[in-house]
Image: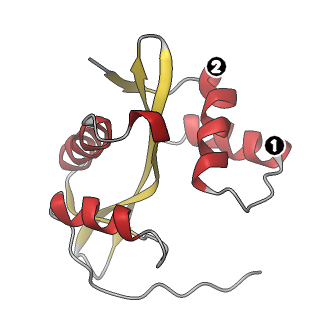
């Protein structure tokens, strides 16, 4: 049975290992990533959670909460969600999502949203099974 808990500074290296699975073609700048990680740990609007199974970190999720005019209230955005390939299909992703839902509800969020790359069709099915609906395209611009 896995345990979902708030991440700590000590989890950074193990979470980076998971992020490399999530973004296999992205070159990660570990120093910049550590700065972002440390900032997130102390930001009350960001929530980092880990799934631990038998002492192993097998899942990670993060969520940002913001005040949003379109939502007419607080909106939670799932920034990352990853479960190790060997641990998928065991309910860990569901546990992470439900934990984020609980945090969002407790924070007074009226919506929870996420974005997912077009090629992640398996993930899309997972999100739809958790009640998420496809609503929009996301556009980005590198600065």
The percent coordinates of residue 91 (x first, y second) are 24, 36
Where does residue 28 sit, x and y in percent of width and height?
A: 78, 52
Of residues 109 and 4, the one nearer the viewer is 4
Bin the neighbour count of mark 2 within 10 Å (Cα to Cα): few under 14, some 14-19, many 20 and up.
Answer: few
Q: Quadrant of residue 25?
A: bottom right
Dot 1, crowdedness within 10 Å: few (<14), some or many (≥20)? few
Q: Residue furthest top?
A: 54
Q: Residue at x 67, y 47 (%)?
A: 20
Seen at 77% across and 81% down, the residue is 143
Q: Is residue 96 or residue 105 the one in the foreground?
A: 96
In the rendered view, tell whether residue 9 sits above or below residue 140. Answer: above
In the rendered structure, the answer to whether residue 28 lies left or right of residue 24 reads: right
* Above or below for 4 versus 81: above
Q: How many marks?
A: 2
Image mark for residue 10 = 2
Residue that lies at the very extreme toward the front in this rendered image: 86
| Percent coordinates x, y for residue 44 in the rendering | 45, 41
The residue at 22%/48% (across/down) is: 101
The tag earlier along the polypeptide, 1 or 2, is: 2
**Residue at 20% across / 41% down in the picture?**
102
Question: Which quadrant of the figure contains the N terminus?
Answer: top left
Q: Is residue 23 left or right of residue 113?
A: right
Does residue 16 appear to the left or right of 46 in the view shown? right
User: Which residue is tagged 1?
Assistant: 30
Label 2 SS: helix
Residue 21 can be seen, yes or no: yes
**Is residue 42 visible from the viewing direction of this image?**
no
């Amino acid at each position: 049975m896995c345990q979902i808990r708030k991440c700590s500074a000590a989890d950074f290296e193990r979470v980076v290992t998971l992020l490399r699975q999530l973004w296999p073609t992205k070159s990660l700048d570990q120093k910049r990533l550590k700065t972002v990680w440390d900032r997130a740990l102390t930001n009350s609007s960001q929530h980092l959670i880990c799934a631990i199974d038998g002492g192993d970190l097998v899942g990670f999720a993060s969520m940002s909460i913001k005040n949003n005019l379109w939502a007419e209230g607080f909106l939670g955005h799932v920034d990352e969600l990853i479960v190790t390939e060997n641990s998928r299909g065991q309910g860990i992703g569901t546990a992470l999502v439900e934990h984020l839902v609980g945090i969002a509800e407790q924070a007074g969020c009226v919506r929870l949203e996420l974005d997912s790359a077009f090629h992640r069709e398996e993930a899309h099915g997972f999100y739809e099974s958790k009640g998420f609906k496809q609503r929009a395209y996301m556009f980005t611009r590198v600065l």
